[in-house]
Image (cartoon, helix red, strand yellow):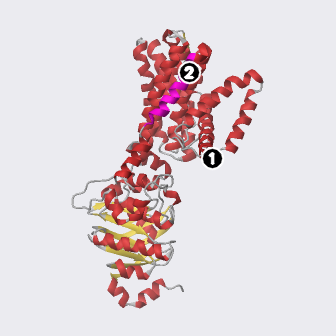
Amino acid sequence: MNSMKSDMKKKSEIDFRIVALGAAVALLVIFAGGAGMSLLATEILIMALFASSLNLLMSYGHMVSFGHAAYFGLGAYGFTLAIVRADIPVGLAVFAGPIVAMIGGLIFGALCVRLTEIYFAMLTLACGQITFTVLFQWYDFTGGDTGITDFMTPRFGLSEQYFAVFTLTIVILCLMFMWRVIHSPLGLAIRSVGQDRYRAEASGLNPRQLQLIAFTISAFLAGIAGTLFAVFHGNAFPDYAGLGFTLDSLIMVVLGGMKSFAGGIYGAIAYTLLKTYVPLVIQEWELVVGLILLFIVLATPFGLAGGIKRLQTMLGMGGKP
Amino acid sequence: MLRIEGLKAAYGSSEALLGIDLKVDPGEVVCLIGRNGVGKTSTLRAIVQDLIGVTDGTVEFEGTSLVGMPPHKVNQMGVGYVPQDRRVFASLTVAENLRVPNPRKRDGANRWTVEKVYDLFPQLHEYRSRVAGVMSGGEQQMLSIARSLLTNPKLLLLDEPHEGLAPKVAEEVVDAIIDLKKEGVSMVISEQALHTIKKCADRVYVIDRGMTMWDGSVDEFYASPEVAEKYLMVQ
């Protein structure tokens, strides 16, 4: 019985070697690469958190959201509006973003979890579009399509490198939190509902309640990403809640690999790099990115994370989580 | 402990049950028998309120009506359900599957723990870190029963527990059911194999065309072969 407990522990505990390795690579890029690389690294880090929050829903809760940018946007606007409209100091406003996103997730989630599968996805799409439209058209309050700019010094006035380190810290903390959630009894319950809600029900779990909890946690994490993004650029636009960002996050999760914790992170790295460097070579960058996506999806159905795992087994190394 | 009277239930507009009467006393094992499609599974589903609508009659568990109650609440009341198709969480390991149930502390009920379940099904302990989806049908069936036990049910519903299993494996499942009976777990088992009924049932209900047609003790059932002939033989 003891061996069973330790088996479980080993699997569910955070492997700090991997965290340290990831942080070391990021720090190396930030300090060796200079200001330009730091900006790119910051964007990748924020997207990694955003994609991971969607991955929590998709890989573990088996809920595909077509409106995930809503919570990213709510995070960005919760933060900026707190400064602009409520005169809250920047240091406190950073908490407003994630909280607004979480409340949004709670309200929209309560609606969405009443349905499942494609109907669930359609409801999330509707909720996402509602958020976008409100941000886009409520000129008096949100500034409409001109967005909100010039309300703070971007990056709190930190240098590119220091802000990248700051973002790295926050993102690592959030991802560690997410890992703990997934491997807690709550996470197990969420995973079992995702896999078979009727069996979970027969085991005494309340599927809607658990899905709503997962949805709210996911919205909260997306809100942190949105807030970081608004701090990073020093602005907020309705696009942050639009279909473009939703699609980006979906692509990142699929590209990085579903059913894997690291899927969102790999996806964010690969997609952001493609989006940054392919346009320098060819104007029709979207075509190239599309072809690359097609190849990856066909070659490794579980995305980059799946591909890496397969490579590791082929080389005879132990798989990392 | 369980009392069903004049139960009628339907899937949408297609009626499946037209008049089921059933009673289970504490510690009793009751078998539902009947040909395919007569409503055995529907009866069990109507008890746990799973995907079937009760249109008339009463379903009471310990004096509380279960009609219209959400399925997870029924489970929390102390009714465990092991469906026919087993349905383990295929991508979770055996140990993880067993950590899913939401255990309730019940006075007087058997307190099942993971250790106790492993004693009942030693194979599960052996395969505890294996992914459930790759196990054999019999092992999945055992896991499914084990998982239900961990919700500490007072009453366990088993839907054709050894359907689709190799005879030897089916035998092991039957042995487990007999062990459970010794532990004092009340059970309703939907069953087609008559030799199993002899081994573990106290009473038998014969169902035909959505209605309870005959009920009595196991001895009475075997003393009246005309019942089996009338309702179970393929005509």
- Which mark is first along the chain, 1 or 2? 2
Subunit that carries the residue with mark 2: A
How far apart, in angstroms, are the residues tagged by discs 2 and 1?
A: 29 Å
In the depicted structure, whether residue A119 falls above or below residue A274: below
In the depicted structure, whether residue B95 falls above or below residue A256: below
Q: For mark 2, what is the residue?
A: A28
In the image, B120 versus B70, the foreground residue is B120
Q: For mark 1, what is the residue?
A: A314
Q: Residue A264 at x, y = what percent?
A: 56, 34
Q: Residue A196 at x, y = what percent?
A: 48, 53
Q: Residue B74 at x, y = what percent?
A: 35, 57
Give the magenta range: A14-31
Crowdedness of circle 2 by 10 Å Cα count: few (<14), some, many (20+)? Answer: few
Subunit that carries the residue with mark 1: A
Q: Residue at x 36, y 86 (%)?
A: B221
Helix, strand, or loop for circle 1?
A: helix
In the image, B50 versus A170, the foreground residue is A170
